[in-house]
Image (cartoon, rainbow, N blue to C red):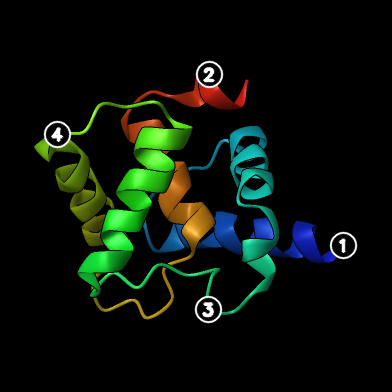
Amino acid sequence: MGKRDELIAKYADDLKNKCGVTPDMDLLTKVTIGCGPAIYDADAATVAASQEGELETVKNNFLIKKLGLSDGPELMAAINKVIETYGMSERNKYRAVVYYMLTKHFGKESVYG
């Protein structure tokens, strides 16, 4: 089992145990691959939910550029909802997990089709 497979298993575990979500493993794998080398960097692999700039980056680079959504208050509302689902007290909010939940939230699985 490679490093990426280990990370995908860890993300699936987070989705199940911390977010109460049964992951679609095929989609989770594609989202993880879509994150690129960031998943191997300790700092880039997580989302700093308490930093406004970080949340803006998720909105602009992922929701608008990657998923093709139009900017609006519903984007930040969805990010906050996902962060809340993950758990505000959860120290490590993995980027792939946050992106996966946002993809599901907006029904944009086709982007990874």
Label 2: which residue? 110
Residue 52 position in % (x across, y down): 21, 67
Residue depth check, mark 2 versus mark 4: number of the one nearer the observer: 4
Residue depth check, mark 1 versus mark 3: number of the one nearer the observer: 3
In which image quadrant can residue 93 be found? Answer: bottom left
Q: Is residue 101 visible?
A: no
Label 1: which residue? 2
Q: Residue at x 14, y 36 (%)?
A: 74
Residue depth check, mark 3 versus mark 2: number of the one nearer the observer: 3
Viewed as shown, does residue 85 lie left or right of 28? left
- Which dot marks residue 72? 4
Label 3: which residue? 43
Q: CA distance from mark 2 to mark 1?
A: 26 Å
Q: Answer with mark 4 or mark 3, whichever residue precedes in sequence.
A: 3
Query: Which quarter of the figure is the N terminus placed in?
Result: bottom right
Q: CA distance from mark 2 to mark 4?
A: 21 Å
Q: Answer with mark 1 or mark 3, whichever residue precedes in sequence.
A: 1
